[in-house]
Amino acid sequence: MLVLALTGDIGAGKSTLGALWREEGAQVWDADILAREAWELPELRAQLRERWGDAIFSPGGPLDRRALGERLFADEESYRWGCDRVHPPVIKALEERVRESRRGWVVVEIPLLFEVGVPSWVDGVVYVGAPERRREEWNAHRRLAGADLAQRQRWLLPEGVKRAQAQVVLENDGDMESFVAEGRRLGHRFRRMASAVELRGVWAEEAEARRLGRELVEARLGARVSVAEEGRILRRKGTVVEERGWAVTVTTLEELVGAAMERWGLSSSGAPDAVTVLPRGRSPWEELVEIEENCR
């Protein structure tokens, strides 16, 4: 499983990239949508009414989001007040969705990721950047004027600080075709990283186990192989016996499991006993990158 946080400048192309990756098979969750839902929670509506009265509610009770935005971004104290209330339920909701996913490639789009703090359950961060002129043009289409944009960016961390903390930086500084092509390339890479598994088999002879392990790494059918002696207690022909064997555990990708097992089946001692394919637990970003790069 791979959990990516997607963030970047306002109007840089985060949502475009998120939609593209959803088409590529990722599960994508948008913090902005969850924030809109969070403001409708009874306890938050009550706090909003206590602070600003009925001025931010439309006739009939619906929240007037434009009026809310004007007040939240009016000054730093109001901005911090709003962040302290809406961010905790949003991050909690995202974490619940990630935990329910369990496997595969998951993307959480969080515009204020670094301002909130990167959650511990995120494996890597993708930052989308774009030239200021391009962002201004795109934000104009969204009816976000330059003055409004400047007001919303006043208390954000500097761009350079956020870029330095991201594992991947994607520049949206060319034409849309190039941006989409690079997004697809990254998507293919992330999908592979998310598919890391462990293939395990047991051989009777140590020499054979080590030879096959080396062959898989040399053929790039596995990124790493561990070979360890183990004892087994099992029933053979009605009798419980104890045996010694050599367990080979191969870290590979799902798409290569068939080829790796075929290589094992061609071994001089025949197929191994007790072959299993196990999903990997969470791994450090650098380890997932290494696995993806060394399995081809």
Image: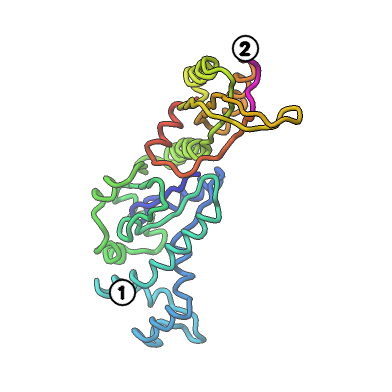
Discs 2, 1 touching: Cβ within 8 Å: no
Say few, some or many: other residues with alpha carbon within 10 Å of mark 1 (under 14 / 14 to 19 / 20 or more): few
Q: Is residue 69 left or right of residue 259?
A: left
* Image quadrant in which you'd find residue 25: top right
Query: Which amino acid, by three-letter code, is at mark 1?
Result: Trp
Q: Camera-side residue: 63 or 28?
A: 28
Above or below: residue 203 compared with residue 90: above
Query: Which amino acid, by three-letter code, is at mark 2?
Result: Ser
* Image quadrant in which you'd find residue 69: bottom left
At which x and y percent is residue 227?
49, 25
Secondary structure state at the residue bearing disc 1: helix
Q: Which residues are magenta?
A: 269-273
Q: Camera-side residue: 242 or 47?
A: 242
Judging by the rendered image, the residue that carries numbered circle 2 is 268
Judging by the rendered image, the residue that carries numbered circle 1 is 81
Q: Is residue 22 left or right of residue 87?
A: right
User: Residue visible at 31% across and 62% down?
Assistant: 149
Q: Residue furthest right?
A: 238
User: Residue visible at 35% across and 54% down?
Assistant: 118
